[in-house]
Image: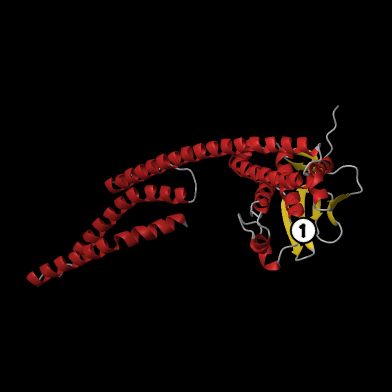
């Protein structure tokens, strides 16, 4: 099939010269026939002319085919060596080498610039974490004196929000080298959930949210990277707390674990504001805040985007369902792992 396509292109490229050659040959034979009416020999000169044309095309084909076959293989992402046989092919090869060299040079420059930008951005965010930690220490110290407790609590909430944004920024930077920071193994989901819920105990109390884990088993081992999996869950839990606006009575935040033979899924149900149906298809897009972004000024549109990116890289699936004013349900599914025993 490839040889046929190349031959078709070869004939098309040389169709003009073939037509001109045959026209010239016909003109010459006609001229001599008119000059010498007695000469009626046509077959012999036509045979010689056609034979020479075939020889020329055969030699040209031998020079044309290998290079164009190599180009066709390269376009199909197959490794092969490009060997030019004509001056025209050599000129094009030099042009390709020059353009490739320029592209490689510019690409390396952009990589270096990007590396430098990420380096400074990463360090800048790490420096931002210092005042956040200092504010946290001051708040904890003042809380013990019970002075201006309400103001301090609000400052603490803003400080936690700032800390979350910084962590999201650092996570986006680390995503550039995700594969270099990956350690996939069997991890028990249950203690991970308990730890993350406990870390946000004060936020839940402040928002009148009562988290609960619904699971009858003793463990739920999944195949994942423990650090990146925690970052994934943090984004979902933070969103569930953020969008659980105050209302009469308490609100539930349910973590439901379901096991099957090959998979383990975690369903996180909140009783927050929910997401309109017309926004659901776009919630995983970067910086998309949708209808809720007009109501909640602290919406960034980064959390769910990071969740989807991390889930894809970890080989997990994430789905979201929601109903306005009733809440949102996020389901994450991993491959089931096995309990690791030390011998």
Q: Where is residue 288 in the image (x, y as percent from the top left)?
A: 62, 58
Corner quadrant of residue 108: top left
Badge 1, how many Cα within 10 Å: few under 14, some, many 20+? some
Q: Which residue shows up at 66% across the image and 42% down it?
A: 167
Corner quadrant of residue 41: bottom left
Left or right of 116? Residue 295 is right
Q: Is residue 110 above or below residue 59?
A: above
Q: Which residue lies furthest to the front in this view?
A: 147
Of 189 and 209, the residue lying toward us: 209
Q: Residue furthest top?
A: 343
Q: Which residue shows up at 55% across the image and 39% down it?
A: 121
Q: Where is residue 145 in the image (x, y as percent from the top left)?
A: 81, 37
Q: Residue furthest right?
A: 216
Q: How many marks?
A: 1
Of 319 and 72, the residue lying toward us: 319
Q: Is residue 30 above or below residue 248?
A: below
Left or right of 34? Residue 97 is right
Left or right of 41? Residue 206 is right
Q: In this view, does 276 lie above or below 161?
A: below
Q: Position of residue 276 (x, y in %)?
A: 71, 66
Left or right of 260? Residue 55 is left
User: Which residue bears the numbered disc 1?
Assistant: 245
Of 216 and 114, the residue lying toward us: 114
Q: Which residue shows up at 49% across the image and 51% down it?
A: 76
Tell me if I can see residue 282 in this picture: no
SS at badge 1: loop
* Quarter of the picture holding the C terminus: top right
The image's colour scheme reads secondary structure
Tell me if I can see residue 25 in this picture: yes
Q: Where is residue 70 in the image (x, y as percent from the top left)?
A: 42, 47
């Amino acid at each position: 099939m490839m040889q046929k396509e190349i031959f078709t292109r070869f004939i098309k490229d040389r169709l003009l010269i073939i037509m001109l050659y045959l026209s010239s040959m016909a003109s010459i034979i006609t001229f001599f026939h008119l000059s010498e009416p007695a000469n009626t020999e046509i077959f012999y000169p036509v045979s010689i002319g056609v034979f020479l044309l075939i020889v020329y095309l055969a030699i040209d084909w031998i020079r044309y085919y290998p290079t164009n076959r190599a180009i066709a293989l390269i376009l199909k992402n197959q490794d092969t060596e490009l060997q030019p046989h004509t001056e025209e092919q050599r000129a094009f090869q030099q042009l390709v080498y020059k353009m490739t060299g320029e592209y490689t040079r510019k690409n390396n420059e952009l990589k270096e610039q990007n590396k430098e930008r990420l380096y400074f951005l990463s360090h800048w965010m790490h420096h931002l974490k210092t005042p956040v930690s200092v504010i946290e220490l001051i708040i904890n110290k003042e809380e013990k004196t019970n002075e201006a407790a309400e103001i301090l609590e609000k400052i603490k909430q803003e400080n936690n929000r700032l800390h979350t944004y910084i962590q999201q920024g650092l996570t986006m930077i680390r995503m550039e080298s995700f594969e270099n920071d990956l350690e996939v193994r069997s991890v028990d989901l249950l203690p991970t959930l308990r730890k993350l819920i406990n870390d946000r105990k004060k936020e839940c109390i402040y928002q009148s949210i009562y988290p609960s884990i619904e699971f009858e088993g003793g463990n739920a081992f999944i195949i994942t990277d423990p650090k990146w999996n925690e970052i994934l869950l943090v984004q979902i839990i933070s969103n569930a707390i953020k969008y659980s606006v105050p209302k009469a009575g308490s609100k539930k935040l349910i973590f439901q674990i379901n096991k099957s033979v090959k998979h383990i899924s975690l369903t996180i149900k909140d009783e927050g504001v929910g997401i309109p149906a017309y926004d659901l298809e776009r919630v995983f897009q970067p910086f998309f805040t949708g209808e809720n972004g007009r109501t909640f000024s602290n919406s960034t549109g980064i959390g769910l985007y990071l969740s989807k990116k991390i889930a894809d890289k970890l080989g997990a699936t994430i789905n979201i369902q929601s109903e306005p004013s009733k809440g949102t349900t996020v389901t994450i599914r991993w491959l089931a792992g096995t309990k690791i025993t030390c011998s």
